[in-house]
Amino acid sequence: MSCNCTAIVVAIFIVIILGAGHAVTGARIGAMMIRQPVQMFREAPAFWNGAECAAGGGGRVDIAMTLDANYLRGTMAAVLSILQHTACPESMVFHFLTAEADDRGLAAALRASFPSLDLRVYRFDPSRVRDRISRSVRQELDQPLNYARVYLADTLPADVRRVTYLDSDVVVVDDIRALASVDLAGHVLAAPEYCHANFSNYFTDAFWSHLALNGTFRGRRPCYFNTGVMVMDVVKWRAGGYTRRVEEWMAVQKRRRIYHLGSLPPFLLVFAGRIRAVDHRWNQHGLGGDNVEGRCRGLHPGPISLLHWSGKGKPWLRLDTRRPCSVDYLWAPYDLYRYSSPVIEEW
């Protein structure tokens, strides 16, 4: 039996590449066609509103997320967890911001897994922030889409007055309506606040040694909060010109290098000490470990409503490489990824 070893080696390489991406459905190598399954995610169960929703408790809840090919698997899990744990799933409206040129393919994947989902997709122009981004400790944090949350109020339609923003590496294990309806008490943002964290670590010596810069915190008690879980008063954000305020600090960063971590520090500079603090149960963050090595971390004590794999380690990647952390098994039940291998056909 003759064997074209070179073609086989190339075919194996293509199999590996195709297994890593979901956009390509097939490739031809000589007399062989390598096919990827078109639908890489299973269809989720249908979820319907409970009786309490019909009685007036099912008001619309607007949720915003980013949509990116590299994080699509996490987004799928997050959406499933939200629908599964709310009493009023039909009241959820999802707004996705994407920088992908082929946003229709990503939206189609979501619609295939969630046929009844009320979702809207908005194109985020990466050029809007490309010249404002400074290099940080992790490449993923430097992607333009990581800054899309700054422009939520500018992107969403006028009828969205309040929105709950979530990162794609979360799962919600409680009714999201409890977070989305929190009393903002006149504040622009609400989020879990962590005043025990060493706040000074988020900024450089150049910032702390400059009186005019660090004076921005004068008169307030700044505490760390994670921007991957926020409730935003969109109307107040627009009226207060907060997009411009965050951008101004990004411009200072380009000139002076005053912080390290992507889009988080400019939010802290504008809002730390000025947000509505909510219960820590709504952001059990840091499950992805640190931003350099992504080492395993355990759960914090106390009740949990939302699990967040912030940090370098993502649960789907650690599970696939068979090196999961114990907390990753809490994410696995929401994974809609269809495990299957490409098929090699003779032509």
Image (cartoon, grey):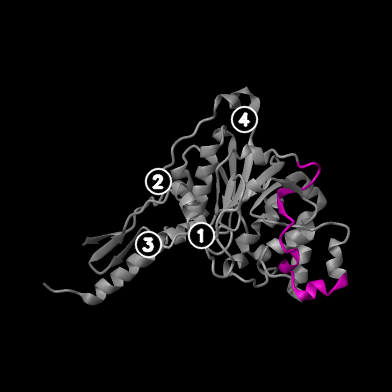
Mark 4 or mark 3: whose residue is earlier in sequence: 3
Question: What residue does disc 4 label?
Answer: 58
Identify the magenta region: 184-211
**Looking at the picture, how far across and down is residue 301, in whole percent?**
61, 50
Q: Earlier in the sequence, mark 3 or mark 2?
A: 3
Extreme residue in the left direction = 1
Residue 19, horizontal then vertical, whole percent: 37, 62
Find residue 321 and report its image quarter.
Answer: bottom left
Assess whether residue 191 is covered by the magenta stretch.
yes
Q: Amino acid at mark 2?
A: Arg
Closer to the camera in the image, 307 or 341: 307
Residue named by callout 2 = 42
Residue 21: numbered disc: none
Q: Element under label 4?
A: loop
Mark toward the start of the polypeptide (4 vs 2): 2
Kind of residue at badge 4: Gly
- Closer to the chain start, of discs 1 and 4, is 4
Q: Position of residue 1 (x, y in %)?
A: 11, 72
Q: Is residue 159 left or right of residue 291?
A: right
| Disc 3 target residue | 19
